[in-house]
Image (tube, rainbow, N blue to C red):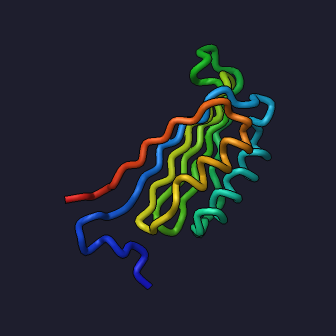
Amino acid sequence: MTYNKHFSTGNYGLEAVIDFHGCDVAKATTENLRVFLDEVIKLSDMEAHGEPIFWVDMEATEPHLKGISVFQWIKTSNIVIHALATGLVLFNLFSCKPFDPDVIVEFGRKFWQADRVQMNVVDRGKN
């Protein structure tokens, strides 16, 4: 099976860069991030490769650094999430396997109880 049907046209993959604003900061725990990550993997039909790597820094004095980050290798690239104590959740999914970013936006909006979402989708490796 070829993961990226567009590879022959010069499009290597897709990266969804999603910012969830005004999130419920109480949900920013390693347990909730694991649940969110597992559901995103299912919804996007990806395959996790290994265990997620968490970075927890609730002692940072700079508000934009205080929070929890997680990195997850997937068979076709990676997922990175930063859940900040300011109520901002930053999400990236890069894959050479096609996926629907709108599905992730809708799930994330509900999960994080975000009041605003910004998304940029980038074609990677495009000629």
Left or right? Give the position of 125 relative to 58.
left
Q: Residue at x 61, y 65 (%)?
A: 48
Left or right? Give the position of 2 relative to 106.
left
Residue 62, horizontal then vertical, whole percent: 59, 15
Residue 97, horizontal then vertical, whole percent: 45, 68
Q: Is residue 62 above or below residue 12?
A: above
Q: Residue at x 62, y 64 (%)?
A: 50
Left or right? Give the position of 29 relative to 79.
right
Quarter of the rendering occupied by the N terminus:
bottom left
Q: Residue 74 is drawn in which quadrant?
A: bottom right
Quarter of the rendering occupied by the C terminus:
bottom left
Q: Residue at x 79, y 46 (%)?
A: 31
Q: Residue at x 50, y 52 (%)?
A: 93
> How many labels sit on residues?
0
- The residue lying toward the viewer, choosing from 17 and 62, is 17
Residue 126, horizontal then vertical, whole percent: 25, 58
